[in-house]
Image (tube, grey):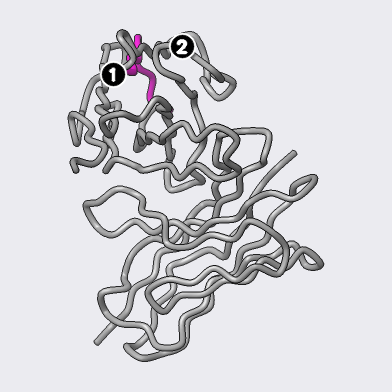
Amino acid sequence: EAGVTQFPSHSVIEKGQTVTLRCDPISGHDNLYWYRRVMGKEIKFLLHFVKESKQDESGMPNNRFLAERTGGTYSTLKVQPAELEDSGVYFCASSQDIAGGRYNEQFFGPGTRLTVL
Amino acid sequence: GNSVTQMEGPVTLSEEAFLTINCTYTATGYPSLFWYVQYPGEGLQLLLKATKADDKGSNKGFEATYRKETTSFHLEKGSVQVSDSAVYFCALKKDSSYKLIFGSGTRLLVRP
């Protein structure tokens, strides 16, 4: 079974440009999450999709970030325009929907390292 | 608010040494606690978990015990190997939420 995949693995862009990150979750996983780690600090939650709906986007830093999950399969995270402080590693994770379950393991992708110059 | 604090790295050990990576948390109620590991070039992998007080999670020789009285979940291994070199993240999850709250990560380097 394929794991969570992310594309690209690295991206280097100039301040003010636009970048789009893609995440393909494990097949059949309804839940999809975006996290990021900035400058070696803690990994912070950005948002959570259930199928194509945004369940929780409380961690999105500002309106320069737009996440979509059309059709409830893969997801994209667009940063427009990118700023220097957006540099970091963006992780995607997915999990099954276990009704009534207390624990629902999240499986992570390798991350996209974004550098804004 | 909810948060996780873990010891800063890097931690450098010789092979077969004893490992402890400290993790403490702040949260209301009874969160679930996790250790994730990120090997070079790979994504985060769940290493072990504990869902209630006094539970001990274990995997691949690593152990951690959920201590509610000290709000801690320290990671231990009796004899590390070079292949254990990685970044280790402590995390919590509240029952009422799907999101994981991570610490800042601790890099472990094991020398032969």
Q: Which residue is mark 2?
A: A53
The local crowd at label 1, few if under 14, some if 14 to 19, many if 20 or more residues have their Cα within 10 Å, is some
Mark nearer the N terminus (1 vs 2): 2
Name the residue: 22% across, 35% down. A5
Instruction: Establish whether labels 1 and 2 are both on one chain.
Output: yes
Question: Above or below — where is B40 with respect to A59?
Answer: below
Residue B47 image position (x, y, % from top left): 42, 62
In the rendered structure, the answer to whether residue B3 lies left or right of residue A22 reads right
Task: Determine if the magenta segment contains residue B58.
Answer: no
Name the residue: 30% across, 48% down. B43
The local crowd at label 2, few if under 14, some if 14 to 19, many if 20 or more residues have their Cα within 10 Å, is some
Give the amino acid type for the residue marked by disc 1 in the picture. Answer: Thr
Which numbered tag is attached to residue A73?
A: 1
**Quadrant housing the N terminus of chain B:** top right
Residue A32 image position (x, y, % from top left): 40, 27
In the rendered structure, the answer to whether residue B5 lies left or right of residue A4 reads right
Question: Above or below — where is B16 with respect to B41?
Answer: below
* Chain name for mark 2: A
Question: Above or below — where is A66 with respect to B38?
Answer: above
Give the amino acid type for the residue marked by disc 2 in the picture. Answer: Ser
Task: Determine if the magenta segment contains residue A80.
Answer: yes
Name the residue: 35% across, 16% down. A82
Question: Above or below — where is A16 with respect to A7?
Answer: above
Question: Which image quadrant for residue A57?
Answer: top right
Viewer-side residue, B100 vs A111: B100
Q: Which residues are magenta?
A: A75-85
- The CA span between labels 1 and 2 is 11 Å
Task: State the SS at label 2.
Answer: strand
Q: Residue furthest bottom?
A: B16
Task: State the SS at label 1.
Answer: loop
